[in-house]
Amino acid sequence: MVNFNYNPENKTFTATFVGRMDTLAVEKMNEVMSVNIPLSEGKSKDKIIFDLRDVEYISSSFIRICVSIAKQAGQGQFSIVHCQPFVKKTFKISGLDDILNVT
């Protein structure tokens, strides 16, 4: 499950995820995310944040979406926050923790 929130004061778009981000869950939310996340041709005017506070597992499908959105958003416009230790370790092992600004 994912919830979206936009803060116009600091131009921040936050997607808050809950549960396991396995392949099945990602397939179900992929279309919803593509419609709701504010991306234009190669750059984002807004900072995009994925909040994973309530996520205990991520699949390679979820990582692929993170990489795709980070590329579309542009450098410094995408970050992943509030990762559980196991999730953070998964990003680190994949070598994407710095690229995706994982905290």
Image (cartoon, rainbow, N blue to C red):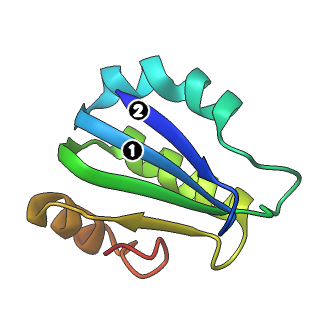
* 17 lies above or below 35: below
Dot 1: element: strand
Would residue 52 appear left or right of 67 to someone viewing this image?
left
N-term-proximal mark, 1 vs 2: 2
Would residue 70 appear left or right of 82 to someone viewing this image?
right
The total number of labels drawn is 2
Residue occupied by mark 2: 2
Q: Quadrant of the image for the C terminus?
A: bottom left
Q: Quadrant of the image for the N terminus?
A: top left
Q: Where residue 13 sits in the image (x, y, percent)?
A: 60, 53
Image quadrant assignment for residue 21? top left
- Amino acid identity at mark 1: Thr
Residue depicted at 19% across the width and 58% down the height? 87
- Amino acid identity at mark 2: Val
Q: Which mark is residue 16?
A: 1
Would residue 8 appear left or right of 53 to someone viewing this image?
right
Along the line of sight, which residue is nearer the eye, 7 or 34?
Answer: 7
Residue depicted at 52% across the width and 38% down the height? 4
Along the line of sight, which residue is nearer the eye, 35 or 96?
Answer: 35
Q: Are marks 1 and 2 in contact (CB under 8 Å)?
A: yes
Residue depicted at 73% across the width and 46% down the height? 38
Q: Residue furthest front?
A: 9
* 21 lies above or below 80: above
Mark 2: give few (<14), some (14-19) or many (20+) Cα within 10 Å.
Answer: some
CA distance for labels 1 and 2: 5 Å
Q: Where residue 41 sits in the image (x, y, percent)?
A: 89, 53
